[in-house]
Image (cartoon, rainbow, N blue to C red):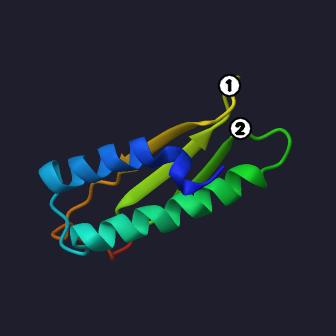
Amino acid sequence: MTVDTFKTEIAEALRSFEKFIVCLDKTPEDFAASMITLMEKAIKAYESRAENLRHGIALDKQLTIILSQTEGEFPLCGIYFNLSSPYHKNSTHKKNK
């Protein structure tokens, strides 16, 4: 299993990224390179998973790739865009108890 195994899924995700996703951190070229790197990590995680696990997962701030075991020859591939806003700030104060 290689990255080329999932070239259809990668191509669809790249088309969606260029058409629908606004990403301030990555250009489409950077996104494509990240997707290849994450797919390699997901494949490695999938192939080295424990016997009772069914998934290989790799992610960064903008993207999550999940390979899920099936009854077929190759796993299902899920590519998810992690939605976030650069304007969202984490709460730094603690709640008073």
Up-down relation of residue 53 to residue 4 (above or below): above
Residue at the location (28% across, 53% down)? 14
Up-down relation of residue 13 to residue 86 (above or below): above
Q: Quadrant of residue 28?
A: bottom left
Up-down relation of residue 83 to residue 6 (above or below): below
Residue at the location (24% across, 71% down)? 89
Amino acid type, label 1: Gly
**Classed neighbour count for the residue bearing mark 2: other residues with Cα under 10 Å, few (<14), some (14–19), many (≥20):** few
The answer to whether residue 26 is seen in the rendering is yes
Nearer the observer: mark 1 or 2; the answer is 1
Amino acid type, label 2: Arg
Q: Quadrant of residue 23?
A: bottom left
Residue at the location (32% across, 67% down)? 31
The residue sitting at the front extreme is 4
Where residue 54 is drawn, which disc sits there? 2
Residue at the location (55% across, 46% down)? 5
The residue sitting at the top extreme is 71
